[in-house]
Image: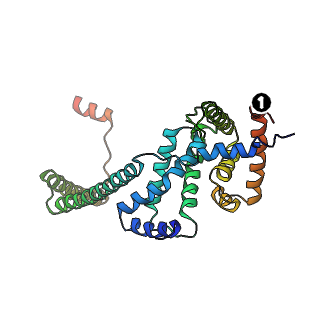
Amino acid sequence: MNNPERPSFDQELAASLSRGRAVAVPGFADRVVDAVRGERRRRVIVRWSSVATAAAACLVAILTLAFPSEASLNRQTLALVARDESSQFADLLGVADDLSLLSPAVDKPSVVDVLNASGS
Amino acid sequence: MLPDDEDDKRLMALIAEGDDDALRLLVHRHHARLVGYLRGEVGSQATAEELAMEVFIRLHRAAARWRPEAKLSTYLIHIAHNLVLNEWRRRGRKPTTALEFAAEPGDTSQQSARRVAELDEAFHRAIAQLPPEQRTAILLIVQQELPYEDIAVIMGVPVSSVKTWIHRARARLRELLKDFHGN
């Protein structure tokens, strides 16, 4: 049987928990404001870094296209020459093919015939 | 002077415009109960303060989108509860073991103060052993004195689930404290 003067379990539970309901922390609000300001500064820095990086990339692309390097020019020139040589070579081969069609067939002498001719 | 709920809406509108003094005032008004709730959940004053800080930072980020459909105090507990869930996952859902409660006795007599301190210590250790859902429910109903409907919204469950957890929590606490309480 419960002692009427003694608080019940639920009453003691409520009393105990209510003692920890609010825990004031001195200076907490200032800490929160400082943290928020820090986050705001970081966001600004990140935003401007992204803009600067994008602008730098655009500038490099523009300069590269407008003023190609000497090495790049040399490579392009060699590539053109190579294309030109190969097209000339292809032309030569094409003429040789034509000539081979026109020339009569020549029997190649046998080794025996060559040796006999040189011996006599 | 506006009631707190109405003033909270006014402060949130100012915070959305970047007013740091409004943020300071809002934090000053609400942080004590938030830290109290979080300390009950995680059992550590330092962790409770870290989590409370994160709650207000998230509130600040969401200030422009916040719609005053619920009381701000309830909304803060909602954010806090989500952070507690993350903390449980990080800890592997183990009950809190390191309790740093400094009991605040309400009686001036030495013997009574010692009794109150021991009781508080015993209750908090027992609450730390509850399953997370029961612990949250009992803290919100008994410590924070929130209505069942608000607790259901915060925990994302039906009211019937909240009542079940509270019932089980009370039974479990009675069992854990039967030698101490003597009933």
Quadrant in which residue B74 is drawn: bottom right
For the C terminus of chain A, the image quarter is top left
Q: Residue at x 69, y 36 (%)?
A: B126
Tell me if B53 is positioned left or right of A34 in this view: right
Quadrant in which residue A99 is drawn: bottom left
B143 and A115: which is toward the camera = B143
Query: Height in image: B180 above or below A80?
Result: above
Q: Is residue A120 visible?
A: no
Quadrant in which residue A104 is drawn: bottom left
Tell me if B163 is positioned left or right of A40 in this view: right
Q: Residue at x 40, y 65 (%)?
A: B15
Q: Chain of mark 1?
A: B
**Image spot of residue A29 (x, y percent):** 40, 52
Residue extending farthest to the right is A1
**Image spot of residue A110 (x, y percent):** 33, 37
For the N terminus of chain A, the image quarter is top right
Where disc 1 sits, the SS reads helix
Residue extending farthest to the left is A70
A71 and B127: which is toward the camera = B127
Residue that badge 1 annotates: B179
A92 and B90: which is toward the camera = B90
Q: Is residue B109 visible?
A: yes
**Image spot of residue B20 (x, y percent):** 35, 60
Tell me if B129 is positioned left or right of A50 in this view: right
Q: Mark 1 is on which residue type? A: Asp
Q: Residues within 10 Å of mark 1 (few under 14, many from 20)?
A: few
